[in-house]
Amino acid sequence: MSFHSRLQTGWRWSKSRPKHVLALLFAAVFVAANAWAFRHAWVMTHFVLQGETTAKPENLSTLEKIGVVFTGITIERPQNGRTPSDLGMPFETHRVASSGKNELEVWHSPHAEARAVVALFHGYHCSKSKLLAEAQAFYDLGCSVLLVDFRGSGGSTGSKTTLGVHEADDVVAVCGLAKQLTADQPLILFGESMGSASILRAIALGGVEPAGAIVECPFNRLTTSIERRFTAMGLPSFPFAPLLLFWGSVQHGMNGFAHNPVEYAAHVTCPVLHLHGEDDKRVSVTDATEIFDSLAGEKRFELFEGVGHESYCRAQPDLWRRHVAQFLDRVCAR
């Protein structure tokens, strides 16, 4: 049978069975959408050893956005470019076991007259060296510091992230190390973005009991965070965001739909300093307020005008230092 004859036969068949054709089209779209979501969930949570990291959505051209839609993003495994010694701080390197056979690299900078120890946890697609400015500020304020690489980043093992779900286990592991190193000092947890979400989860579900916590720009729900990324790309979030989160959950053996810092906050009774940027496009002020309102203990909310989803310590160092110093004075005086 010639190609033309086959084409005619197929056309007649499709005209005589419209319901079958619609069913096949629906199945094809369903399979394609899930394959697309699986791919995007994978590349968002698995770092590559080599490759140029895709720019933030707002920095992409229209043509580049189209390419990302079809191929997904590329995220190079985060590395540490500097150490505390570059800022004149003494430090020693420790390694601590976490869940999933992961091993974390931790830099400890002991202060000779420490009034507290601060453990710092970085955000998504970052490493501990990104928090050196904050670490130096805490050190200058009389604190020993622990700088932590989450699993998949810097000197720690692995090459993937779960956006704060399993990273909460890393927080628990580092808190155990902090007790071994500085048993007589109050422990303060500091986190940026994903690091903040990990801290809140570790306190709510991991049994961690710090003397206080400083959280910067935690997302209220993982679903909201993913939806915002679609919005930044100029794409509808439904049904793609739920599909992406579903397949990400399958890939990592977790329930991403239940990863909600706003719910963790209701179980956080230690003093909390919640810092947020007014111009944050990833986490709105409304999202941040929802988390703050849920916090169960003593709390304080400070808004940084004209600042986005970035380091507040570097953006407005004097204001950041003032808020943090006041918080440390209150917590350490207890």
Image (tube, rainbow, N blue to C red):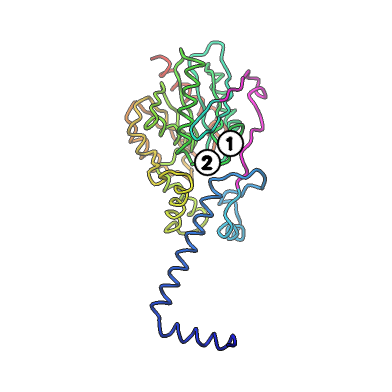
Rendered residue at 50%/83% (across/down): 10
Q: From the image, tell me which residue sits under label 2.
A: 161
Kindly identify the amino acid type of the residue bearing the numbered disc 2.
Thr
Residue 48, x across and y down, in percent: 62, 45
**CB within 8 Å, label 1 to label 2:** yes
Front residue of 254 and 187: 254
How many badges with numbers are in the image? Answer: 2
Please give the range of residues in magenta: 75-95
Kindly identify the amino acid type of the residue bearing the numbered disc 1.
Ser
Query: In the rendered structure, does residue 223 fall within the stretch colored magenta?
Result: no
Query: In the rendered structure, does residue 76 fall within the stretch colored magenta?
Result: yes
Residue 320 - label: none
CA–CA distance in space, label 1 to label 2: 9 Å
Q: From the image, tell me which residue sits under label 1.
A: 153
Residue 89, x across and y down, in percent: 63, 19
Front residue of 305 and 154: 154
